Amino acid sequence: MKYAGLLVMPAGFFLALAALVLFTDPARRGAFIVCGLAVVGMGLVVAVKGHMPARGATRP
Amino acid sequence: MNPPVPVAQVPAMSDAVFALTLALLLLAPLAIAGVALINTGLGRSRSAAQALLGNLAIVAVAAIVFTFIGASFAGTLGNSELVLHAAGKTWSVLGLGPFLLHGLGSAPPQAQLALLFEFLAVAMAAMLPWGSGADRWRLAGGCSVAAIMAGIVFPLAAHWIWGGGWLAHLGANFSLGAGFLDAGGAGAVHALGGLSALAVVWIAGPRRGKFPKEGLSTAMPGHSAVYVIFGCLVALVGWLAWNTAGAILWLHSPLSALPGTAINTLLSASAALATTFSVTRFRFGKPDASLCANGWLAGLVASSACAAIVTPAASLFIGGVAGLFTPLLVELFELALSVDDPSGAVTVHGAAGLWGLLAVGFFAPQEGQLLAQLIGIAAILGLALPLVYFLFLVLNRFVPFRVDPDGERIGMDLHELGGGAYPEFVIHRDESYR
């Protein structure tokens, strides 16, 4: 799960980058970039949750 | 404030400006010294010598590796670069400068100063994860991470942002304001360093006894509030010089704009401290010294991106927001997300750096600047964090980050250096190891 989140994050970056090439209209471009950032954010949340030690698990 | 000058219209640097910038860059290492003091003070007394020596060693390793590899990839000296062509545009992705700083003496004065700026920046960026791994991270691991940061990760960011890379050309290529703006290194230094700190904390794991099986996390307060707060004052001097030098080098600000840059830096830190002071006073009944120091530093970090661009009123707002979220985020990371970050670098440098970059988009006068900043943030967060995480994960296989349990129990000073920072002090039994 932690690796999946980290692998999703670059996908969000490439979405944001694609917005530059695909759209010239500032509104559409902006919306697409924000979507890319949202994907980056979702990947980060998954990575953070994946790195949280399970409750009651043996910890160092 | 003066709007940033597009990359294509770089004015020639006069002798007076060269001398001023050089003088500022010679003061800027005080920011590094301040952060080193803060990180040491926030760690435990039995690891203080190892923490401070680690900072010094990391600065040295970063400088050497940047000389051998990093400076070439940053592409500050020379005009060679790896360029991709896509969608009818050129995308400069990597510098291919001369090896071992060849031709430094004959380079234009501005390029020499830019290189000096990058040397300081790489030292700071490589040092930030060290504070987060305090009390359990081996010197060898810290130095290896510094080598990776200085050889691969930082040069990429430096080239993209400062070396005429694709982020810097977002304005010229896609009409997004003046391109991605980060004059003081909020992205290339602080956000990158803060996110690297998060990767290190994830890989190394928490300190022993920090998160017991039951109940809340164990409080492990820093050993010297004096170091921490004095470090904040030292860092202020360095930051004033750093941001002002960055404004000259990367935004080509005129001399008349420089006092405003310094004032904005101070205002951002002051507003951040006032907000953190109020938040901790409200939440805990009394202001928390270490969190206030973190708030001050977060204000300085946020100002790195925008001090040369925004108005004093905007600086107060930006610093105030940084000071507001810093104590809350530090608490969230520790209590809810089980991230053991003794120095708070993930929040102070990572989150505040990203906030500063975003604030440039909100307050800069150019149209499209916000989108340029968002693209840059997506690159740092979406590309740099996974990159450093997987690089560090591989590195950890060869140079284990974490000290053995016995070393952690007796302290990093005795385990790694054979002597403590305070030899005449009695070391107390640690209740967290019961």
Image (spheres, coloured by chain):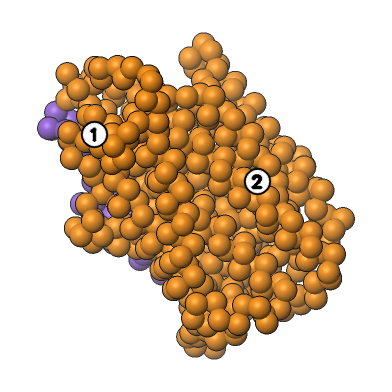
Chain colours: A purple, B orange
Identify residue for label 1: B408
Q: Determine if marks 1 and 2 fall on one subunit.
A: yes
**Kind of residue at disc 1:** Glu
Q: Which quadrant would residue B175 be assigned to in this image?
A: bottom right
Please give the name of the residue rendered at 40% of the width and 31% of the height, measured from the top-left corner: B421
Residue B238: image tag: 2
Q: Whole-percent x and y of residue B98?
A: 52, 83
Q: Which of B326 and B76 is in front in this view?
A: B76
Instruction: Determine if residue B362 is in view.
Output: no
Looking at marks 1 and 2 on the same chain, the residue that comes earlier in the sequence is marked by 2
Q: Which amino acid does label 2 sit on?
A: Gly
Say left or right for B281 vs B105: left
Q: Which residue is drawn at 80% across and 48% down?
A: B260
Identify the residue shown where x is 76% and y is 77%.
B9
Q: In this view, does B18 lie to the left or right of B360?
A: right
**Image coordinates for residue A17, horizontal then vertical, percent:** 47, 71
- Chain for disc number 2: B
